[in-house]
Image (cartoon, grey):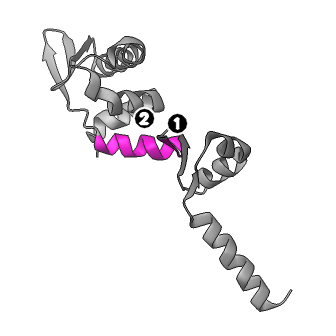
Amino acid sequence: MSYAVAVEITEKAAMNQSAVVDYPTYSSARTHFKDILDATERGGSVTVSRDGQVSVVLQADRLRSFFSRAVSPRVELAREDDRVIALMSGRPFVSEGASVDSALADLIESLREYAEDWETRLQQAPNHRDNWALVQLIKLSSDEELLEWFERDGE
């Protein structure tokens, strides 16, 4: 293979890797599902249209990372008698425990229960509707990642 041909092949491969991939129909996306996953694995995002709605497919870690910076946990800790209180300022989440670790673990459990309730019934309620990003962050994060999010205050 000549140098010129090798360069051309490399340039085409680079263009394909960096190009945004869009599928105008569900059927075309289904046919190219492996290509969709390959594109997201390379760090891209893919759009799929269906019935006038456009959805985006991207790596979950990338989305989780974005939400962890965009959604502030605003966790405050306080001691009350022999208990530690963990609360999320401006949000209806308060937990307690014998130690900071147990209060934060209880807060994570409360957040997970909330995410389940939000998915099944709360997402249409006016006072919960805007918590979509928080719920997605909870669903995409491990307990350890949520603890890190608390500690870094979303930064």
Q: Is residue 110 above or below residue 46?
A: above
**Magenta stretch: dominant secondary structure:** helix
Residue type, label 2: Glu
Rendered-image quadrant of the N terminus: bottom right
Report the magenta residues as a range.
54-70
Is 86 left or right of 38, judged from the image as shown? Answer: left
Disc 2 or 1, which lies upstream in sequence? 1
Q: Residue 62 carries which label?
A: none
Tell me if residue 30 comes above or below residue 89 in the rendering.
below
| In the image, residue 62 lies in the stretch drawn in magenta | yes
Distance between mark 2 and mark 1 Cα atoms: 36 Å
Q: Which residue is drawn at 41% across and 45% down?
A: 65
Q: Above or below — where is 4 with respect to 93? A: below
Is 38 positioned to the left or the right of 56 in the image? right
Identify the amino acid type marked 1. Asp
Name the element at disc 1.
Answer: loop
The quarter of the picture where residue 136 lies is: top left
Residue 113, x across and y down, in percent: 39, 13
- Give the camera-side residue of 79 and 56: 56
- Front-most of 33 and 80? 33
Q: Quickly name the residue at label 1.
A: 51
Q: 103 and 142: which one is in front?
A: 142
Residue of label 2: 145
Q: Residue at x 36, y 37 (%)?
A: 148
The stretch drawn in magenta includes residue 67: yes
How many neighbours does mark 2 have within 10 angstroms: few (below 14), some (14-19), or many (20 or more)? some
Up the image or down, 26 lies above or below 138; here it is: below
2 or 1: mark nearer the eye: 1
